[in-house]
Image (tube, grey):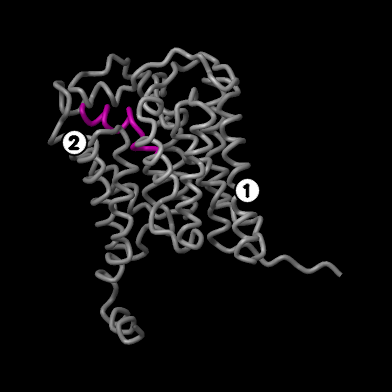
């Protein structure tokens, strides 16, 4: 008689919803760049599944096919890449992403957000390849070398003190060179609302994160234009909104206490803008996440109710 499957845990269910929410982004990437994004995603997802099977065998544990965390991290990593990136970098970056998860004994023990780690590590290794992007609506060859004409992203122009020459409507619609799924700001904001309304994530971290980024951009503009232009370009031209959906509110690496979440979101927003302002790369969200992630347990303890904190102290 077949054994009855155990019900999905809340964490497993959450990753299924995250993957479902990424489908419109994948569809938009295919619409703008052709089939190459699908090939990149397929490579990364297959590696994620194989890595979970191998690690489960090495640890003599049962492989849990319903745990889609590795697949979600692989998809998140790829969606932040240029659609023209070489496949060998996709493979290596995916391995970086999966390594940080398994190095901590699995997702539940991970200190750093895996997709952020994978992208940051790849940026350090291949900065020239990761920050040059094809134009939208130009299908890219699926062969190893795409042969696409590459351009600098608006974030590069801002970093060098210039003003991106992009129509505001194109900026809002994502019609400019950038990461394959991070330029669709309207779609990303709709996904954020969907996840918050569905109680898949709380509003505290992503909303406070975005408000902090906007305030920093307003009071400390990097471009010689109006303050509102500074806010618009800082939020819409990088991976800020994408990061607010898929990076900063990660359920394991972020706090659970509400006050801790508010401070955590503020710290992530401030660190993101500091990295964007003074850092060498255009990935402030990822480096900020890696810097602030380890503070999450401390913030939870700091803002825990006194009775809970005393109970925890007595058990240690």
Q: Is residue 71 magenta?
A: no
Q: Secondary structure at mark 2?
A: helix
Q: Residue at x 33, y 54 (%)?
A: 204
Q: Residues within 10 Å of mark 1 (few under 14, many from 20)?
A: some
Identify which residue, 236 or 196, lies in the foreground.
236
**Mark number displayed over residue 49:** 1
Query: Is 225 situated left or right of 61 in this image?
Result: left
Is tag 2's residue or tag 1's residue first in the polypeptide sequence?
Answer: 1
Relative height, residue 13 to residue 140 (above, below): below
Relative height, residue 280 to residue 260 (above, below): above
Determine the image quadrant of residue 312. Answer: bottom left
Residue 240, given in percent of the width and then of the height, sits at 33, 37
Q: Secondary structure at mark 1?
A: helix
Determine the image quadrant of residue 213. Answer: top left
Q: Residue at x 53, y 31 (%)?
A: 88
Q: In which quadrant of the rendered image does the C terminus lie? A: bottom left
Residue 26, given in percent of the width and then of the height, sits at 55, 32
Q: Which residues are magenta?
A: 230-242
Identify which residue, 116 or 221, lies in the foreground.
116
Q: Residue at x 37, y 58 (%)?
A: 254
């Amino acid at each position: 008689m077949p054994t009855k499957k155990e019900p999905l845990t809340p964490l497993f269910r959450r990753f299924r919803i995250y993957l479902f929410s990424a489908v419109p982004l994948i569809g938009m990437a295919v619409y703008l760049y052709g089939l190459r994004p699908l090939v990149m995603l397929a490579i990364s997802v297959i590696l994620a599944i194989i890595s979970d099977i191998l690690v489960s065998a090495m640890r003599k544990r049962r492989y849990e096919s319903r745990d889609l965390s590795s697949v979600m991290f692989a998809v998140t990593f790829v969606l932040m890449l240029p659609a023209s990136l070489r496949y060998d970098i996709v493979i290596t970056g995916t391995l970086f992403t999966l390594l940080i998860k398994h190095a901590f004994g699995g997702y539940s023990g991970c200190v750093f957000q895996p997709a952020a780690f994978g992208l940051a590590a790849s940026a350090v290794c291949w900065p020239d390849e990761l920050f040059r992007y094809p134009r939208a609506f130009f299908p890219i060859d699926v062969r190893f070398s795409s042969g696409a004409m590459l351009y600098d992203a608006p974030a590069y122009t801002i970093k060098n003190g210039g003003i991106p020459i992009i129509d505001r409507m194109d900026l809002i619609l994502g019609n400019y060179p950038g990461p394959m799924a991070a330029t669709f700001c309207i779609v990303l904001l709709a996904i954020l609302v969907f996840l918050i309304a569905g109680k898949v994530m709380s509003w505290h971290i992503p909303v406070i994160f975005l408000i902090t980024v906007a305030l920093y951009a307003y009071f400390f503009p990097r471009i010689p234009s109006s303050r509102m232009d500074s806010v618009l370009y800082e939020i819409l031209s990088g991976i800020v909104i994408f990061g607010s959906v898929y990076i900063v509110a990660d359920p394991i690496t972020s706090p659970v206490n509400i006050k801790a979440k508010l401070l955590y979101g503020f710290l992530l927003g401030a660190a993101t803008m500091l990295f964007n302002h003074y850092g060498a790369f255009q990935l402030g969200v990822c480096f900020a996440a890696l810097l602030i992630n380890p503070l999450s347990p401390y913030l939870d303890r700091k803002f825990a109710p006194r009775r809970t904190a005393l109970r925890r102290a007595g058990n240690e």
